[in-house]
Structure formats: C-alpha cells, structure tokens
Image: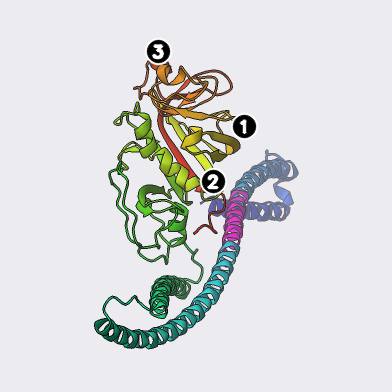
Amino acid sequence: MGRQSNICTGDWMIREVDTLAAKPVISSRIDPDNSSFDFVSPETKSRFAMLDDVKILANGLLQLGHGLKDFVHKTKGQINDIFQKLNIFDQSFYDLSLQTNEIKEEEKELRRTTSKLQVRNEEVKNMSLELSSKLESLLEEKSALQQKVNALEEQLTNLIQSQPGTQEHPEVTSLKNFVEQQDNSIKDLLQTVEEQYKQLSRQHNQIKVIENQLRKTGIQELTENSASSKLRAPRTAFPLQLNETKTRQQDDLPADCSAIYNKGEHTSGVYAIRPSNSQEFYVYCDTQSGSPWTLIQHRKDGSQNFNETWENYKKGFGKFDGEFWLGLERIYAIVNQSNYILRLELQDWKERKHYVEYSLRLGNHETNYTLHLAETAGNVSEALPEHRDLMFSTWDHKAKEQLYCPESNSGGWWWHDICEENNLNGKYNKPRAKTKPDKRRGIYWRPQNGKIYSIKSSKMMIQPTDVESFK
C-alpha cells in the first residue's frame, strides 16, 4: 500500500508541474485591450500560483522521501534476516562435517578391529587343527598300547593261575603306569581342545556381529559386549563352607578369580577354586569394575556378627550373598601363589565412595598372619599402616605386643601398636552413634587428620599384579 501511495503522489506531482508550465502560455494569450479591467496583473498572479505549486510539490517530495525511507528500512531488516539464516545454515553445515569426520574415524577403527579379529580367528583355527591332529595320534597310540596291555594282562593272568603267589612283573607295572599317564595327558588335551573350540566359537560370533554392523550402517561404533558368547551364569548366593572341603581328583580347577576371568567367565558370582598346594573351596569373584577381584571381606548391613573366635577367623564365616569373611587360611593359600594387590572399597553414610590399593605380603599361622603393606593407589589417606608388621588378633587369641586391642575393639583385625587406626571387622553400628564407646567399636577408619569416619559398607579384595598371565 505504501509503495502504491508513493507512485500516485509522484504522478500527481508530474501533473502539477505540467499545469504550472502551461499557465504562462495561457496568460500570454489574453487580449491586451482588457487591461482596463480592475484585477491583478497576470505576472503577479502567475508568480503567486507558482509558489503555491512549489509548496505542494515540496510536500509531495517530502512524503515521497518518507516513503522511500520506510521502504529502505524494511528492505534492510529483510536482508539482515536472510544473513542470520545463512549464518545458521553455515554453522549447521560445519557441525555436520565434524560429525561426519568422527563417524569416518570410528568406521576406520571398526574395520581395524575386524581385521585383527579375523587374524586371531585364523590363528585359533590353525591351533585347533594342530591339536586335533595331535589328539588323533595320541588316540591311535593309546589304542595300540591298550592292545599290548590287554595281551600282557592275559599272559599275566595265565601265569598267576599257573603259579599262585607270583609277584607282578616290573615291566607290566611300568606299562600300566605309562598307560595311566597317557590317559591323563589325553584328558588334558581333550579339555584344551574343548576350550579352543569354545574360544573359536566366540570369535566367529563376534566377527559375524561386526560384519552385520558394517553391512547395515558401516559407521556404527563397536560395543564391547556385542559378540560375547553367553557364559554360564554363576550362583549368586552360596553359603560359605566352614568345614574343610574334600580334595577333588581333577586338576582343572582354577587357582583364583583371575584364572576364571582369563578363561572367559566375566560374570560376578561364586566359583570353586583350588590354589597351589591347597584344597578346593569357594570364593566370590567381583568383576563389576571390568577386572577380576577375589572378595575376602564384605560388610554392608550388620547382619553377620564379626566378633568371632580365632578358629572361625582362620576358616571363614558368613554367606556370600550377605556379609562374610573368607578365612585367613584361604586368603594365605591364594596370595602365597604370586605377588598380589589388596584393594579396600569404603562407602560412608553420605554415600561417598573411597578406595585404596596396596601391595601386600601375608605370613602364615605361625606368624599370626602378619601383614605388610605398601600403598600403590587410592584416595584414602593412611587407611592402613604402611611398612609395618601388622599381626592378626582376636578376643581369644592375642598376638605379642597386642594385649588390649581385641578386647577394646570388637572383631579380629591386624593391629600394630595403636588400636584406633582402623577396624573394618568391628561392630556394625547404625548412623549417628554419638557416644564415644559405641563409635570406637563401630566400623571406622582414622585418616591422617585424626577424625574418625563411620563406614556404611566395606569390601576387601585381592588380585595378582599380573592378571593376564595368571592361570
């Protein structure tokens, strides 16, 4: 509408100019004889008329200028909007290019991982074929030896029947022993082949999943557990055996949770182990952190009384699905195999979590299970005394130089010469235990600042320093 009004105003101004130009011509054609009439001269009249027309023309030009000004402002705003939209488009295009580059890098990493898995798959295939050929040769050898042994047994039976009381021939005894050794070797090889086939199956599944991901999108990120095979779910609740378990005849039990983890069992739960020179017993393997840990102590709700005797602290007590102490003898049997790390995980009543890790040495029962620690990592200041010989004591078994700690602090623990440094096996108090005696007897630790902190839950775990090479 503004633009149309400006055009009309311009046309009107043009017509006015034409009129003004025509007026002098008309006035020049008036008869000079009529000059006797009483009126203003044509020159004066034309001059006044031209001033009025100029004013009208100026007013029109002013209106036209205002219209043009409004039109320019409006056009300028539209241009600014267009530039803003262009900037937004440029930024979106830049972000999209960055995301595209990231996706390309992820795709390259995914392809590299696939090629590595394919190489490992070929290695496992070759190893399985080699083991299969060895197994076949051993089976043939076993069959031939079995036939020889059967023939010798028949001859021996005939000799015994013909000559009662005759002792067994030494060659026959040696052959029997040799056959038994071959049987054991074949069993071990069969178990190894079975494990290799399981591993090969997992590798195949993993490669198939990766190939499907590449085929569908080509750019999706590889997840850590995309192709892991379904493992046997362990028992989550198992009562801690206080009696000594019988030694099994099989020699295939793992030595600790790290060995179980290396065989492909990555689920937390209860497993049977047998450390070197020890009997079989059960432990709880904690893999929540992505690394295998053997849990030796767990406190969380006060359901288990930890003010136990020396014998119970040696053998262990509690339940794996609640609170428990694994047992000093079992802990010593595990850590005596290699160099181990002790990890403490603590949580206070404000849900704050703390941890600390130590390299440790543990003595046997003759040394009262003396513990020697050296901190390696953590965010707890002096949770346990370092570079000292800490002897384990209970209320009914007092180590040397530790005559008062077990009586004044409930539960068995490693003490030195100060009894109020820490005690994770003490009486379990509910929060806000304000009196000093109850607070001293609770689960607590005293860091370097001297303040006693009450602990809501605690875990004590052990792990070999070299997890991958542990079998």
Where on the picture, by quarter, is residue 14? Answer: bottom right
Q: Nearer the viewer, residue 210 or 320?
A: 320
Tally the marks: 3
Q: Which residues are magenta?
A: 76-100
Q: Secondary structure at mark 2?
A: strand
Whole-angstrom CA distance, mark 3 to mark 2, is: 36 Å
Q: Residue at x 35, y 64 (%)?
A: 230
Comparing 102 with 266, the one in front is: 266
Q: Residue at position x 74%, y 50% from top?
A: 32
Residue linked to disc 3? 437
Q: Residues within 10 Å of mark 3 (few under 14, many from 20)?
A: few
**Residue 387 has which mark?**
1
> What residue is rendered at 32% in x and 46% in y?
244
| Label 1: few (<14), some (14–19) or many (≥20) C-alpha neighbours in 10 Å | few
Mark 3–mark 2 contact, CB under 8 Å? no
Numbered mark located on residue 340 in the image: 2
Task: Specify whether residue 434 is in view.
Answer: no
Mark with earlier residue (3, 2): 2
Chief secondary structure of the magenta portion: helix
Q: Is residue 419 above or below residue 391?
A: above
